Amino acid sequence: MRLMKYSFHVNRIPGKELVTADTLSRAPIRKPPTKVDKRLTEDLSLYVANIFESLPASERKLEEIRLHQQDDGVCRKLSEFCTEGWPDRTKLNTTLLAYWQREVISHCKEVF
């Protein structure tokens, strides 16, 4: 939220060129959250709640969307991959392959 006031220009750099950063991102330091971390989590939760309150969809419509996503094979698989981990790229069918590169870049553990 603190960074929302800035405008970013994002450049994609292949992982093979980010050896140190890639290594560190795969082995984060596990430490207890600080007061700042807790405050940021609270602020983020309030922000997300505010977005949901201002959505132009009713709770009924959101539930309908959830049900359709559960019925959709691609959405169901994406949800599974984001919560349980992504398989090797060679094991994905062409429909899901389009999402693989995005997963590698964003590490979408909490999307669904």
Image (spheres, grey):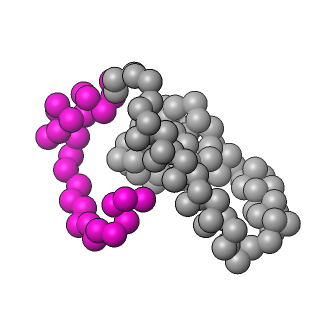
Q: Where is residue 79 shown, x and y percent of the image?
A: 62, 44
Q: Which image quarter is the N terminus in?
A: bottom left
- Position of 20 with respect to 92 (left or right) is left
- Position of 25 with respect to 86 (left or right) is left
Q: Residue furthest front?
A: 35
Q: Residue furthest right?
A: 60
Point 25% across, 34% down: residue: 22
Q: Nearer the viewer, residue 29 or 37?
A: 37
Point 58% across, 35% down: residue: 83
Up-down relation of residue 10 to residue 104 (above or below): below
Q: In this orientation, does residue 53 appear?
A: yes
* Residue 18 counted in the magenta span: yes
Q: Nearer the viewer, residue 74 or 85?
A: 85
- The number of discs equals 0
Up-down relation of residue 30 to residue 82 (above or below): above
Magenta-colored span: 1-27
